Amino acid sequence: MTGFNTLHRKLYFRYLAFSGISLAVLGVLAWLSTQYVYEADVTAGNSNTLSDISTKLLQAMPEPIEITAYIKAGVPLRLQIAQIIARYQRVKPNMSFRFVDPSAQPEKIRALNIGGNGALMIEYQGRSEKLTFVDEPSLSNALLQLANTSERWVTFLAGHGERSGEGQANYDLGRFGHTLAQRKIFVQDLNLAQVPDIPDNSNLLVISAPTAALLPGEIKTLEDYLGRGGNLLVLAEPNTPLLDKLLTTLGISRLTGELVDTDNKLYGIDDPGFIVTGSYNAHPVLKNFQTLTLFPTLAALTFDKGSSFQASALLTSSNKTWTETGEIDKSSRFDKGTDEVSGPLDFAFALTRTLGDKQQRIIVVGDGDFLSNAYLGNAGNMDLGLRLVNWLVHNDNTLDIPAKNGVDDHLQLSQTAVAVIGFGFLIVLPLALFTAGFIVWRSRKRL
């Protein structure tokens, strides 16, 4: 009996020692897991890992990055966004990320011009970018724009009633100019009566709907600027011939009348003079751009194929539009046999030509209101304007990140295979389990 108690005591202490060692090992492993992190992507094609291009970009951005997602609470999109951002945070620990419910900050949402579907605001070194669609290519390219430290200057022609790039009136473009400055694209107004030439540091000249004619000397200055290969953005207006001579030089003609669309009631707009579009032509300016844009007063344009420029139509109206030459109201109708022209009609062109080793870029839009302080916040007007300017100043830096497609992510079964699997799981397997259970039951009953 004494031997049994001794053996029992030894087994008891051995059990205690084994339990203590096991708990100590688990404790050490738990502590180590808080100090060191190891992750592995075992998916086919490393679909949960950043590409080498994005990784190198983050390594070249040493300062902290702040990302705020203005997305409604409880939306599944939050989880998808968080998973994408987490890939970046693994490479860049000083990237902060947070969600904000738009309904909690309505004033800030209006100030940031964020729509009902939400958006991401990315901030780096005092500059910011907004994204309405998030995946690795779009987020990495937004970071690339923020990492770009080169300064560019946009000159707005002034002195003839043009819209000022620094003005705060409803018809001015001050809000747009402020947004450009946040991206190191600075704005300056230029009156040729005071400064007789366009500054050498100007990467782009903007002429926005003048209300008075340019003087012959000013026209000569513009012609010299274009002859040197200067980039140009022209914002024209319907029924205003002041820019027609300049447009003719570029090979652009303005159709008589104002473009109207009686089908815009689908968007809750009663004024047929407002054109809403969400269909965009293929061009680098509009790559992956899908947001609606609003144009309050619009002139249709045509291009002369005999011009020295190569032209691409950027924006085209629907087949329900036409150029109205009379008074515009809810009863306006297309009049056949008149100067009115039915749609679809082009109202924005991108022009290019090569002078020496330089590509000259020009964009003509038949409306100057869509970037004004009064209408800039509508739908995707701001984003469209930024795209136009970025292309015109040759800000072409984009990352070509290949899409990551899963390998063998579809299972193709023949009808025979489907029948065999169905028969096996529905009949053979239940029958086998029943038979095995019956045999075990019989065996135990005989004991």
Image (cartoon, grey):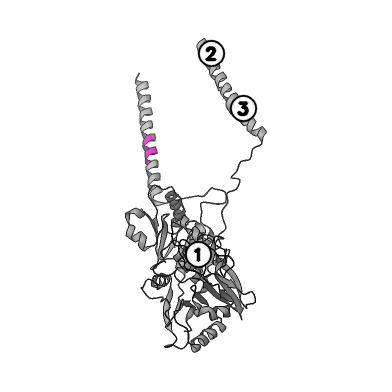
The quarter of the displayed image where residue 29 is located: top left
| Residue that mark 2 sits on | 442
Q: CA distance from mark 2 to mark 1?
A: 88 Å
SS under mark 3: helix
Q: CA distance from mark 2 to mark 3?
A: 27 Å
x then y, percent, for residue 393? 51, 74
x then y, percent, for residue 252? 57, 75
SS under mark 1: strand
20 falls in the magenta region: yes
Q: Is residue 394 visible?
A: no
Tell me the kind of residue under disc 3.
Phe
| Residue that mark 1 sits on | 260
Tell me the kind of residue under disc 1.
Val
Which of the pair 114/1 is nearer the observer? Answer: 114
Which of the pair 269/136 is nearer the observer? Answer: 269
Residue at horizontal 54%, vertical 86%?
224
Q: Mark 3 or mark 1, which is nearer to you? A: 1
Residue 423's disc is 3
Q: Mark 2 or mark 3, which is nearer to you? A: 3
SS under mark 2: helix
Q: CA distance from mark 3 to mark 1?
A: 64 Å
51 falls in the magenta region: no
Q: Callout 2: 10 Å neighbours few (<14), some, many (20+)?
A: few
Magenta stretch bounds: 19-24
Pointers 2 and 1 in contact (C-beta within 8 Å): no
Q: Earlier in the sequence, mark 2 or mark 1?
A: 1
Which of the pair 323/308 is nearer the observer? Answer: 323
Q: Is residue 120 left or right of residue 428?
A: left
Q: Earlier in the sequence, mark 3 or mark 1?
A: 1
The quarter of the displayed image where residue 409 is located: top right
Q: Is residue 373 left or right of residue 287?
A: left
